[in-house]
Image (cartoon, rainbow, N blue to C red):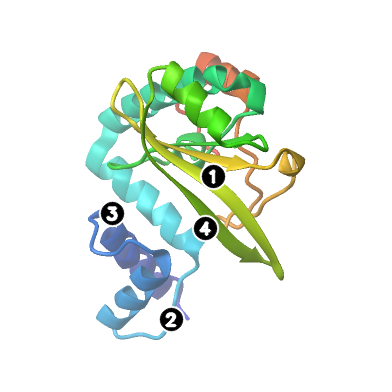
Amino acid sequence: MSTDLNLKVAREAATLLYFGAEKEYKQAKLRAAKTLGTHFLPSNLDIALELDIIAEQNEGANRRERLIQMRKEALRIMKLLSAFCPVLIGSVWRGNIRQGSDIDVAVYVDYPEVIVKTLKIGDVRVLKTAWTTVNKAGATLASFHIYAETSTKYGLEIVVRNQDEAGKKRKCEIFGDEIKGLNIKELQKVLIYNPTQQFIPS
């Protein structure tokens, strides 16, 4: 399969995702392949890299400024939750945000209601909460999700996992690498030295 065709399908899938015609990578790549008359499906990584390019082309300097602001807001939230080993993950960690992106933070505590209470005290508007279960390698993993809005009107999703899961390695289904994220000290360093730094596999 030609590299050119791979790029075309990945670009089409990324366009569908960026403009909201599709929400999931799998459906986007299937629709893109059908549109271009091929059965070839690009990798999630190929699509993600094209999506980053499209976001930069459409949003430019505003995107980079928004990334800095979202990272600053993430730091404020993480300091608020400093007792629970917060880690910045998702697109704000990666540096590949686009319109509609929210701030994703993982915390580790056995009692999720403590996080909800702490957020409310810190002027964070909690919108809803929900338990989520996923199957990984035959094991069922549960996590508690808190959907909120910061005082600066950024969307926020807090993933609450049990304390014994802190430090466990997790593989990114999109980029294929380890989800390392940034802790408070690492995020502070990024904001000082390279506030728009990306953490994307080359």
Please report the residue visible at 31 percent of the width from the left and 41 percent of the height from the top: 56
Q: Position of residue 70 (x, y in %)?
A: 39, 26
Cα–Cα span, label 2 and label 4: 18 Å
* Residue that badge 3 annotates: 18
Can residue 201 be seen? no
| Foreground label between 2 and 4 | 4
Whether tag 1 and tag 2 are in contact, CB under 8 A, the answer is no
| Outermost residue to the top | 192
Q: Position of residue 34 (x, y in %)?
A: 30, 82
| Foreground label between 1 and 3 | 3
Please report the residue visible at 29 percent of the width from the left and 64 percent of the height from the top: 22
Dot 3 alpha-carbon crowd within 10 angstroms: few under 14, some 14 to 19, many 20 or more: many
Q: Nearer the viewer, residue 174 or 112?
A: 112
Residue 171's image quarter?
Answer: bottom right
Q: Position of residue 91 (x, y in %)?
A: 45, 41
Residue 140, placed above or below residue 111: below
| N-term-proximal mark, 1 vs 4 | 4
Residue 174 has which mark?
4
Instruction: Give the residue type that dot 2 points to.
Output: Phe
